[in-house]
Amino acid sequence: MIKYQNLVAGQLTEPLAKGYFENVNPADTADIIGLFPRSNREDVAQAVAAAQRALPAWKNMSAPRRGELIFKASEILLRRKDELAMVIVREMGKTMPESRGDIQSSADAGYFAAGEGRRLYGQTTTSALDNRLAMTRRVPVGVCGLITAWNAPMAIITWKLFPALVCGNTVVLKPSEDTPMTAHLLGEVLKEAGFPDGVVNIVYGFGPEVGEALVAHPDVKLVSFTGSSKVGNAIAADCGRLMKRCSLELGGKNALIVMEDADIAAAAKAVAAGAFSTAGQRCAATSRVLVHDKVYDVFIKLLLTETRAMKVGPGMDPDTKVCPIINERQYKRILEYIDEGKQAGFELLYGGKVFDAGRCAQGRYIEPTIFAGVDIDSRLAQDEIFGPVLAVFRVGSFDEAMAKANAVSYGLTASIYTQDVSLAMVALDRFEAGCCYVNAPTFGSEPHMPFGGVKLSGLGAREPGTQALDVFSEWKTIYIDYSGGVQQSQYRMNK
């Protein structure tokens, strides 16, 4: 069994406590991909120290030069796309097309960030005083701690990493314990691209042992986290107490509205894909659909047809549309929600079963599950399940649909299917969500656009896009006085 190591100061480093955990293939739990370090607080301290040592030279390197290294890394990602995608299929479980898309998104994020190396613009403006220049520039925050999720194991990292690097920060990365191999290979890519030692450090392990230590370390000036709202809340509290910058991309309970004038066939395809691809293991997954009463029966019939066509199985199978569940904890949690829906008497329109025979015998598979008649205040309608479970609501009007769409604590993504342009514009105004769509699924974002949510879905920061530069840089205000005297704008005399 191969033992992998932390990446600290450019060197593969054994964990100080010499503990390891298994990286398990969710499609075949007998397949152990490798052993990864079960790191601790001391390992984190080593990595932060390495990042701190590398910071002066890295932040003093020109931003265009930093961008060139990121561009090289993006080129390598694309050259190794299929190899890297195969690793994602094996350790995360999702299909090959989805995994290749993960790598493509990472490369695109890199190309965009590389270009920002020549566009880290500040502002120049007039001063209230004569013979004085006023200007601003971006400067790095310092050592950044990145704590990332498993469901898009390369893209989530790079959406944070590349903006952080182009701004001149150094990084300590804690990838998800469910997908450490992807992060290991990213370390290889960065090494090949020529990044200096210590600029990016990778420490594997679990949240209570590594994540909490990273948040608490005094030399970590910024924490960027993608994961559950519960954990994000705790991180925000710690960062607030410690006066650290904090960027959170959290959960979602995303709604899609189908109006009576919608393209019903297209809406049904979008809902099935949004709810069940990647087995619903996306923060932007469609977990609620609100259907106008006039088209409800037709929509349900088409939705069931689309859902039945989505084959459940290993991601390696080219026919698979619904992949395995990432780990045992999440598997049991999803089944508990399904049982709760059944016990509550909600109408089970489809699914609700586990697949544990044949090609699914060695993994964790749950059939796509659709409930109707769900109580809007129930946990099934309010909680982020993060699995292939969809709640369907019949509504009588646009206002009712909108009220129910917004009647949750989350606000990540939302969509409406309609041919009425005016109604679509009103929906975009009224959706309480960070990312909104018209006639498109709730999932999917582009690396040059900001992604994030409101309410329990985030803390106001946005990654990636140009908005990520505001996360990973500070503004410095500069005055240059060439008057030859002493001037103060507050004491400027009226003439």
Image: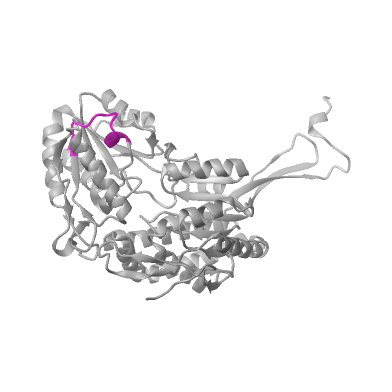
Between residues 383 and 309, which one lies in front from this camera angle? 383
Q: How is the image coloured?
A: one colour
Across and down, in percent, residue 480 comes to: 78, 46
Chain part drawn in magenta:
371-382
Across and down, in percent, residue 383 comes to: 33, 38
Left or right of 243 in this view: 369 = left
User: Residue 427: which quarter of the image?
Assistant: top left
Between residues 484 and 152, which one lies in front from this camera angle? 152
Quarter of the N terminus within the rendering: bottom left
The vertical placement of 376 against 164, above or below, is: above
| Residue lying at 54% horizontally and 40% vertically, measured from the top left | 237
Numbered disc total: 0
Across and down, in percent, residue 235 comes to: 51, 45
Q: Is residue 28 magenta?
A: no
The reply to whether residue 464 is visible in this rendering is: no
Between residues 178 and 296, which one lies in front from this camera angle? 178
Left or right of 369 in this view: 103 = right
Quarter of the C terminus within the rendering: top right
The reply to whether residue 308 is visible in this rendering is: yes
Between residues 376 and 455, which one lies in front from this camera angle? 376
The vertical placement of 108 against 469, above or below, is: below
Q: Is residue 380 magenta?
A: yes
Left or right of 182 in this view: 352 = left
Residue found farthest to the right: 485
Left or right of 490 in this view: 120 = left
